[in-house]
Image: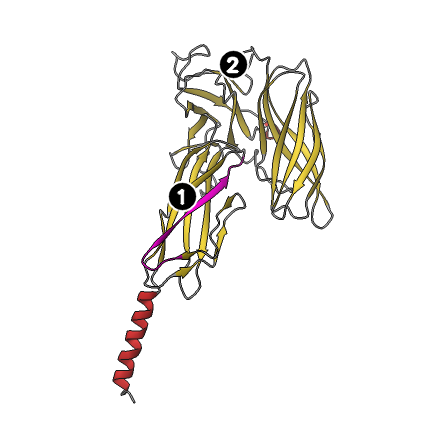
Amino acid sequence: MLSPRRASLALALAVLSSATALADVIADPALIALGFIEPRSSITRTFRLVNTGTTPVTIASAVPSCTCTSVDAAGKVIPAQGSIELPITMKVAASTGIKVASITFTFGAGLAPARVDMQGEICFPVRATSIDFVTAARVPFINAFGDPANPQGSVSPPLSGAVTVESVDGAAFRVLSVMGQPTEFVDASDSASTPRTSHEVRYNFEGLACEKFPPFLVIATDHPKAPVIDIRVRHKCSRIAPRIPFAEYRANLGAVVPGSSIPFEFELKQSKGWTVTDVKSSEPRVKVQLIGQRSDADHALVSLVGTLDPSLRGVLLFPATMTATDPGGATQRSDFWICLDAREPTQKAGS
């Protein structure tokens, strides 16, 4: 029989041995930088799970933070003192802005979970950014809201300013309208006839009634892959709080020929039991018709078609009211925003 001292020593050695055997599983890299991502694209990135312990480890589960991200990992074995390579696939939404997602891996046997994060920016080949009033950082939105933590009476963000519009693909382009109006350039040498890879344009929301405050600033360009871009405008009068679980709050239809019809889709997230039953456009010159809905256990894809009046020209930003039944059978209604530029195929944007 072991003495109390020897028994304590044996227990300590067993604990140490167990801790060594059950060392961490580490994600390499822990953060995957996605860079610029095209809207409605599907991307795959590869990373490793590294087992620093002396015994094999089986992946019990892989739980993504959103249904847009998937990985086939459960049941796979990471060898002792080794690693396995895993691909992560992300389906990117149509809305522009910063995209953050993660997957958490569990292993059982007392091992701590491991997590891999992904971050990038969803943008068209032309992107718009501004300087955030609060953080002084360049961001893919306009902050006209301020910091809610600031005391009442603090200086509010200005309602006018500048947006930098630049090409991600390095192609020179022209900015031809902002919210359907002639562009006001910050640089006096810049103009609607000057192709550049970057432009700085002005916006001004001063004096607008609250109900007229736009949730997006819409910019038309002559870039063939980004004829219409939009940048979110954050303000207390442009808050979007839908009662229907939209994955994104708007559809950018791009350049559309007057008189034509263009199909488009939007996604519902956590949509089990939700059914969109009707849509009504607030813009009489654009008829929006509900075509159908395809659903699975986690999300739904709603198909629509927009038809433009033959006389329509120029940039539009308008809401369509969606009607849906929720899982409890109640009727819910929310606005879904649509932007486009109605132009002939040979017509310059915004004219």
Q: Residues within 10 Å of mark 1 (few under 14, many from 20)?
A: few
Is residue 37 something one can see in this rendering?
yes
Q: Quadrant of the C terminus?
A: top right
- Main secondary-structure element of the magenta-colored stretch: strand
The Cα atoms of the two marked residues, 2 and 1, are separated by: 45 Å
Mark 2 sits on what residue? 182
Residue 346 on the magenta span: no
Give the amino acid at mark 2. Pro
- Sequence-wise, which precedes: disc 2 or disc 1? 1
Q: Nearer the viewer, residue 259 or 313?
A: 259
Which residues are drawn in magenta? 78-93
Q: Residue at x 32, y 72 (%)?
A: 15
Q: Residue at x 65, y 36 (%)?
A: 302
Q: Quadrant of the N terminus?
A: bottom left
Q: Is residue 192 above or below residue 133?
A: above
Q: Residue at x 45, y 32 (%)?
A: 140
Q: How was the colour assigned to the protein in this rendering?
A: secondary structure
Q: Nearer the viewer, residue 186 or 222?
A: 222
Is residue 206 something one can see in this rendering?
no
Q: Is residue 180 above or below residue 212?
A: above
Residue 81 on the magenta span: yes
Residue 3 position by quadrant: bottom left
Q: Nearer the viewer, mark 2 or mark 1?
A: 1
Task: Locate residue 202, reporting x and y percent.
Answer: 46, 21
Mark 1 sits on what residue? 46
Give the amino acid at mark 1. Thr
Q: Nearer the viewer, residue 252 or 78?
A: 78
